[in-house]
Amino acid sequence: MNESAKQGDILESTTDAAEWSLEVERVLPQLRVTIRTDNKDWRIHVDQMHQHRSGIESALKETKGFLDKLHNETSRTLEKISSREKYINSQLEHLVQEYRAAQAQLSEARERYQQGNGGVTERTRLLSEVTEELEKVKQEMEEKGSSMTDGAPLVKIKQSLTKLKQETVQMDIRIGVVEHTLLQSKLKEKSNMTRDMHATVIPESAIGSY
């Protein structure tokens, strides 16, 4: 009886319904459960794959027509280019052959030019050496010619000869003066001797005459 009375007390509530409603409205936002999506969940990836597949299929339906049209136009253009290329090749075949022959001749000419250029280089080097030697010889000849045609040494020699002649004339004059002086002294001495001899001889003759 006590247990049945307790259960009756539990089931029966003395709370006011209006107050209960207000309390539920106040607490209800806090009781909401928010489920966050996890990017690692495989279900989300599957849904995304289905979405992308649907988008690709819808886009493919729209673009397939444009791609087919572009493919057809490109094929026709390539066929035209191929036919035009064949026509141009048939029309320019002889020119192509001439061009190839000209290329072969140009290669031969370049090879000959390289060979000739090597010979020219060697000859140019030899010419430079010969020219350098010639310049040295020419310079030596010019130096010798300038020394031979230079009048300064001749002028000096002439001046020396003139001075030597003047000194010779002066020496001759001095010698003449000395010779004249010697001659005068000899003549004076001879006259003195003669006079002395006469002075000594005359008295003896006088004595003999007497």
Image: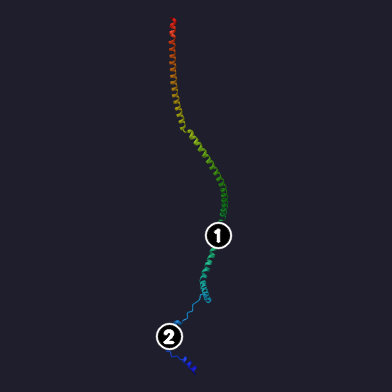
Other residues around mark 2 within 10 Å, as few (<14) / some (14–19) / many (≥20): few
Residue closest to the far top: 210
**Could you tell me which quadrant the C terminus lies in?**
top left
Place of residue 152 in the rendered image (x, y in percent of width and height, measured from the top left): 46, 32
For image coordinates 55% across by 59% down, the residue present is: 85
Place of residue 47 in the rendered image (x, y in percent of width and height, measured from the top left): 52, 76
Q: Secondary structure at mark 2?
A: helix
Residue closest to the far bottom: 1
What residue is disc 2 on?
23
Ranked by sequence position, the earlier of labels 2 and 1 is 2
Spatial separation of the CA atoms under disc 2 and disc 1: 90 Å
Q: Nearer the viewer, residue 187 or 4?
A: 187
> Total marks drawn?
2
Q: Nearer the viewer, residue 89 or 157?
A: 157
Q: Secondary structure at mark 1?
A: helix
Quarter assignment of residue 168: top left
What residue is disc 1 on?
85
For image coordinates 48% across by 34% down, the residue present is: 147
Q: Which mark is residue 129?
A: none
For image coordinates 43% across by 6% down, the residue present is: 207
At label 1, the amino acid type is: Glu
Relative vertical location of residue 27 with respect to residue 71 in this rendering, above or below: below
Q: Nearer the viewer, residue 50 or 136?
A: 136
Other residues around mark 1 within 10 Å, as few (<14) / some (14–19) / many (≥20): few
Place of residue 205 in the rendered image (x, y in percent of width and height, measured from the top left): 44, 7
Place of residue 6 in the rendered image (x, y in percent of width and height, measured from the top left): 48, 92
**Mark whose residue sits in front, 2 or 1:** 2
For image coordinates 43% across by 85% down, the residue present is: 23
Determine contact: label 2, label 1, CB under 8 Å: no
At label 2, the amino acid type is: Glu
Relative vertical location of residue 159 with respect to residue 25 in this rendering, above or below: above
